[in-house]
């Protein structure tokens, strides 16, 4: 038994795990916390019961929101003699074919009827069902199954799943980066274990997480970030093991110029600015447990010393001073930690020998690219994503002007899904309109004596003849 | 140098990629005393390559110059000698993500073909994963074994010269992912399932013809695979070009108000009022319209 447990251990759901809930093509990333209700597809559910089960198990949502593992595998609809029509010439869509009302169905749901039973009722009470063709019946049943589905599958997060989730749920948060475009970025950037990769993104951490997954904890990733602090919400969804965070560094872009100029001092920095930063950060971050305890006890003490006179007041003053000191000490420690991290990231960067650069943000990519490409070794790939082609045209032009890159390519990918069924295979009716654009290339040794690469001469459009 | 790890200096025995310009590349086996002919002249390995930094500019005998690049699977895909039709980077990227490949993954692949996808897989699963690749053509199998060795990735791959439809992948219960690029993938679905871990895994089948896709999807569903999805992905390239467009001459302006005259003319066109220069992209004359359909599926726990 113990052997089996070990074998399955990494496939078992544990409390605190980051998981992805799935129904059909809808995904949602959540963290398992006991007694915490999460909403998924308009239903409130409790995740407590999934702990201990294996990943990829499908659960039924019982009343009250608790989950029960689903017993049967999907049974095919009964294969008894199907009564079916040949075409729809006589089927009139007057909205009256279904005899059951909304209320009837609600009653059935409340009675706890299973989905299969509800669907069977719908079929039995449909005046047109038997006139539909077999294919139409198939389609009808599939549609009802989807509508009355009451299940949810618990998945282990992977880049594929999280990228599809973000693209389906919150594309705005990821600059409308479609998952196939992300796939291209990871491959064109040659992201692999053991390299040193720079990432600048405002995609909620999705791109960063994807890069980290492909590096498997080996090598290092430096997140260049704008503003006060790096955004990493998306990274949490991946549920990486703790040691992956050891390879993750961050560096604020406001210090890039100083670093490039060699004037960045990671020793005693401007204390007031750092303090402000830290205080602001401390407001938002969760208070340390020690601090909480500290906060807790003086309040209690204060209540107790209500009746004391001067002695009580003195004690109060002492307590306050102690608290202030503790807080100042805390801030000092945090400041030191921040400084240490900055120095570590700077050390990784100043050699200007990074192996890859990935950019995906709402910032104008041109300046970002020209600034960060200086950190790459020669003969290393870089990839820039933009929702808008024009910005990448500018990047391309500037790179050609300054030299130092080859293999520049401005591309986007066209993605189409298919329905594959016997005699009913065709592309799906709706497809994604666009997934963003990519500019990719390779750095080469910068040679200042060499003239910039020639651009093809601007073509003069002739008025008379037309292009072939 | 290896295809799974960067290095800085070119050494004897490396496989380097020479970039000739305009996205034209060629692979070069670096050897003391050897020479490589290019249209810009001769590259002498001992003086021009060995000891130089990857990314350096190399001036060839005729005076023209090229750049020498560190190999990557993507460059290899474009440079490799084709023994079969190969998978290109666009499809490879999609396959890599949809099969959830990452360091440590164990992958089964058939047919190996020219090794284009194989190199990309190896790069992604290194340093702790393994690739089991099956190729039924003996010479191709031998050639690819040679290349894996030259590219310093042989410790991560096992090549088997057999027919996957009859004999399977040569391993059972170990794979996180299986990739099929063979004429009759439906005949290998059973073997694919057997090769995969009991906990489950991902599968991909690549087929140019829709009939193959239909048969494969049916076989996958019959064998208990779930989440069967077929898609295709195509690359669109945008060629950045400055374009000069003529402005029409409608004759002298009958209104002749100064504002109108200066209205539309940007400063640069003031000297040459007859045209406008814009920076835009043009599509290539032709583009690949189809490579193959990618069918993905998930093997549940068995």
Image: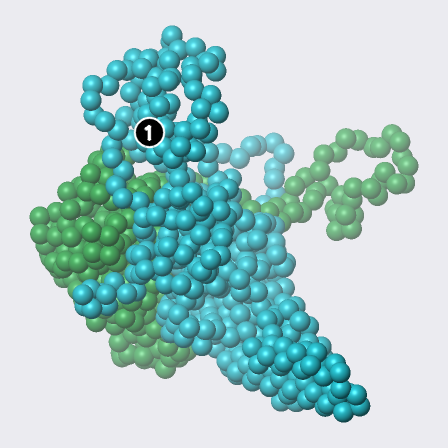
Chain colours: A cyan, B green
Residue at 32 percent of width and 75 percent of height: B1
The secondary structure type at the circle numbered 1 is: helix
Question: How many C-alpha atoms fall within 10 Å of the one at disc 1: few (<14), some, or many (≥20)?
Answer: few
**Relative to A180, A326 lies left or right:** right
Front-most of residues A410 and B231:
B231
Q: Is residue A274 above or below residue A141?
A: below
Front-most of residues B51 and B274:
B51
Residue B89 visible: no
Image spot of residue A226 (x, y percent): 63, 67
Q: Say which chain tag 1 marks.
A: A
Residue at 31 percent of width and 34 percent of height: A420
**Relative to A225, A153 lies left or right:** left
Image spot of residue B78 (x, y percent): 34, 56
| Residue that protrudes farthest toward the front in the picture | A307
| Residue that protrudes farthest toward the right in the picture | B257
Q: Can you say which quadrant of the picture contains the N terminus of chain A?
A: bottom left
The answer to which quarter of the image holds residue A98 is: top left
**Relative to B41, A352 lies left or right:** right
Image spot of residue A166 (x, y percent): 49, 51
Front-most of residues B54 and B197:
B197
Q: Is residue A185 above or below residue A333?
A: above
Residue at numbered disc 1: A117
Residue A246 visible: yes
Q: Is residue A344 above or below residue B35?
A: below
The answer to which quarter of the image holds residue A53 is: bottom left
């Amino acid at each position: 038994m113990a052997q089996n447990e070990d074998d399955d251990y990494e496939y078992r759901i544990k409390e605190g795990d980051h998981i992805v809930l799935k129904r059909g093509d809808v995904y949602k990333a959540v963290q398992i916390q006991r007694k915490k209700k999460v909403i998924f597809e308009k239903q409130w559910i409790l995740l407590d019961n999934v702990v201990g089960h294996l990943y990829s198990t499908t659960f039924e949502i019982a009343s009250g929101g608790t989950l029960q593992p689903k017993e049967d595998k999907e049974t095919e609809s009964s294969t008894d003699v199907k009564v079916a029509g040949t075409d729809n010439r006589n089927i009139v869509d007057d909205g009256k074919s279904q005899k059951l009302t909304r209320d009837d169905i609600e009653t059935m749901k409340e009675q706890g009827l299973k989905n299969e039973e509800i669907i069977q009722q719908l079929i039995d009470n449909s005046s047109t069902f038997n006139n539909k063709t077999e294919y139409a019946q198939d389609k009808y049943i599939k549609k009802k199954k989807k509508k009355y589905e009451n299940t949810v599958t618990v998945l282990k997060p992977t880049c594929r799943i999280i990228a599809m989730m973000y693209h389906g749920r919150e594309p705005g948060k990821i600059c409308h980066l479609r998952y196939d475009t992300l796939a291209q970025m990871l491959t064109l950037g040659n992201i692999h274990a053991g390299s040193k990769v720079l990432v600048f993104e405002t995609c909620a951490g999705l791109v960063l997480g994807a890069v980290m997954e492909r590096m498997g904890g080996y090598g290092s990733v430096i997140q260049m970030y704008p503003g006060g602090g790096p955004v990493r919400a998306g990274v949490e969804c991946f549920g990486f093991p703790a040691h992956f965070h050891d390879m993750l560094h961050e560096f604020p872009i406001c210090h890039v110029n100083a670093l490039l100029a060699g004037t960045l001092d990671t020793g005693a920095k401007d204390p007031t600015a750092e303090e402000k930063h830290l205080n602001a950060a401390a407001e938002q971050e969760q208070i340390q447990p020690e601090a909480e305890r500290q906060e807790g006890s003086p309040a209690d003490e204060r209540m107790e010393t209500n009746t004391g006179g001067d002695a009580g007041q003195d004690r109060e003053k002492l307590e306050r001073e102690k608290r202030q000191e503790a807080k100042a000490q805390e801030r000092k420690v945090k400041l030191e930690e921040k400084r240490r991290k900055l120095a570590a990231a700077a050390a990784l960067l100043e050699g200007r020998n990074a192996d890859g650069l990935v950019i995906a943000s709402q910032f104008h990519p041109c300046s970002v690219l020209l600034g960060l490409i200086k950190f790459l070794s020669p003969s290393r790939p870089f990839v820039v994503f933009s929702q808008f082609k024009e910005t990448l045209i500018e990047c391309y032009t500037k790179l050609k002007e300054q030299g130092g890159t080859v293999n520049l390519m401005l591309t986007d990918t066209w993605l189409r899904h298919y329905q594959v069924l016997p005699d009913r295979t065709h592309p799906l009716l709706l497809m994604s309109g666009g997934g963003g654009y990519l500019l990719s290339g390779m750095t080469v040794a910068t040679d200042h004596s060499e003239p910039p690469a020639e651009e093809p001469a601007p073509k003069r459009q002739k008025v008379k003849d037309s292009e072939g | 140098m290896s295809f799974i790890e960067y290095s800085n200096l070119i050494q004897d025995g490396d496989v380097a990629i020479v970039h000739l310009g305009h996205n034209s590349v060629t692979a070069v086996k670096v050897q003391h005393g050897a020479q490589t002919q290019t249209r810009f002249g001769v590259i002498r390995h001992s003086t021009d390559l060995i000891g130089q930094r990857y990314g350096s500019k190399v001036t060839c005998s005729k005076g023209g110059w090229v750049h020498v690049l560190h190999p990557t699977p993507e460059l290899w895909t474009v440079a490799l000698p084709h023994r079969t039709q190969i998978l290109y980077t666009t499809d490879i990227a999609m396959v890599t993500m949809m099969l959830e490949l990452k360091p440590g993954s164990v992958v089964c692949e058939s047919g190996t073909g020219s090794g284009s996808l194989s190199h990309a897989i190896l790069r992604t699963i290194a340093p702790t994963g393994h690739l089991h690749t099956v190729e039924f053509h003996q010479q191709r199998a031998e050639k690819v074994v040679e290349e894996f060795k030259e590219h310093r990735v042989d410790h991560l791959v096992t090549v088997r010269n057999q027919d996957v439809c009859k004999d399977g992948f040569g391993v059972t219960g170990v794979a996180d992912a299986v990739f099929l690029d063979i004429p009759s993938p439906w005949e290998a679905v059973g073997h694919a399932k057997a090769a995969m871990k009991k906990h489950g895994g991902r599968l991909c089948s690549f087929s140019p013809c829709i009939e193959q896709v239909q048969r494969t999807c049916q076989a996958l569903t019959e064998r208990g695979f779930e989440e069967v999805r077929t898609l295709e992905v195509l690359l669109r390239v945008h060629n950045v070009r400055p374009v000069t467009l003529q402005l029409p001459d409608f004759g002298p302006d009958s209104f002749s108000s100064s504002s109108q005259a200066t209205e539309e003319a940007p400063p640069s066109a003031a000297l040459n009022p007859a045209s406008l220069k814009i920076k835009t992209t043009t599509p290539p004359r032709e583009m690949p319209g189809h490579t193959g359909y990618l069918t993905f599926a998930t093997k549940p726990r068995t």
